[in-house]
Image: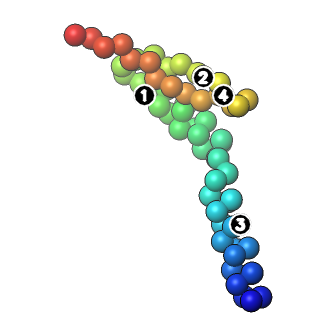
Amino acid sequence: MKLLSILSIIIVQAAFAQMTPDYAKETRWAAQVEDALMDGDSVWLSANNHEFLSIFITECV
């Protein structure tokens, strides 16, 4: 029973560690994408007190 409790605690901790966003990595990737963007415009959106990059592309027919 004690082993089962320890294993469940470890699994829960691992699950929460995977759910934590890495904002520093996201910011680096956004800067790289924004610099290399060939089509469309970069637009910074905000949700839950966090800014993130989106790309606005108009359809050219």
- Please tell me which of labels 3 and 2 falls first in the chain: 3
Q: Secondary structure at mark 3?
A: helix
- Placement of 51 over or under 21, stated as above or below: above
Residue for badge 2: 45
**Place of residue 37 in the rendered image (x, y in percent of width and height, measured from the top left):** 41, 24
| Residue 10 location, quadrant | bottom right
Q: Are marks 1 and 4 in contact (CB under 8 Å)?
A: no
Residue occupying the point 70% across, 31% down: 48
**Place of residue 17 in the rendered image (x, y in percent of width and height, measured from the top left):** 67, 60
Q: Please, what is the three-letter code of the amino acid marked with disc 4?
A: Ala
Mark-to-mark CA distance, 1 and 4? 24 Å
- Please tell me which of labels 1 and 3 falls first in the chain: 3
Residue for badge 1: 36
Q: Nearer the viewer, mark 1 or mark 3?
A: 3
Residue reaching furthest right?
2
Q: Are marks 3 and 4 in contact (CB under 8 Å)?
A: no
- Locate residue 20 relative to residue 54 in the image: left or right: right
- For label 4, count other residues whose C-alpha is less than 10 Å away and answer few (under 14), some (14-19) or many (20+): few
Q: Are marks 1 and 3 in contact (CB under 8 Å)?
A: no
Q: Which mark is residue 47?
A: 4
Residue for badge 3: 13
Marker count (numbered): 4
